[in-house]
Image: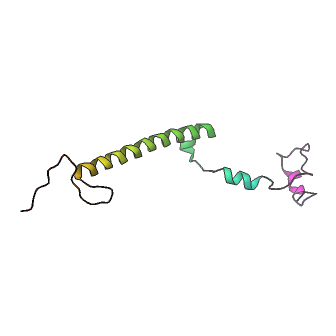
Amino acid sequence: MVNQGSRDEKSMKNDPDMLEEYDFSGSVRGKYAKRYAEGTNVVAIDPDVAEYFPDHDSVNDALRSLTAIIKRQRIAEQRDSEERSYHLGLRSTGTYEPHRGCRQQSRF
């Protein structure tokens, strides 16, 4: 779909940011829109937070650092949970089985 003198041409001429040198006569509207939308996640950042992040690279670096912390915390929590289960004698089936170091008391 080639743009040939669209009705937006008048509004573009009235736009102070649109210079006369700009030529969109052979352009295709939305040519890369789908590809851009698939690979981009736009997030609005509040002004009080944005003052600490001057560009997208600083935001991505901060989020990657936070992601690394979250991963380490999840691994530690999983390890702690497995250790508690082991010491309580719980197995992956959820049933009680004393581990080898424990003596099982007889009911009789």
Viewer-nearest residue: 86 or 97: 97
Viewer-nearest residue: 24 or 98: 98
Please state if 31 lies on the left or on the right of 60 as rendered: right
What kind of secondary structure does the magenta stretch mostly adopt? Answer: loop
At x 27% / y 49%, what residue is drawn?
86
At x 40% / y 44%, what residue is drawn?
75
Task: Estimate the x, y position of residue 78 in percent, counting from the top left.
Answer: 37, 48
Task: Please give the range of residues in magenta.
Answer: 8-30
Task: Estimate the x, y position of residue 40 in percent, counting from the top left.
Answer: 66, 50
Q: Is the residue 41 above or below the residue 93 in the image?
A: above
| The magenta stretch spans residue 23 | yes
Q: Is the residue 83 above or below the residue 4 in the image?
A: above
At x 23% / y 53%, what residue is drawn?
89
At x 81% / y 54%, what residue is drawn?
31
Residue 54 visible in the displayed image: no
Would you identify the image quadrant in which residue 19 lies?
top right
Residue 65 visible in the displayed image: yes
In the current view of this chain or complex, which residue is farthest to the bottom?
108
Location of the N terminus by quadrant is bottom right
| The magenta stretch spans residue 105 | no
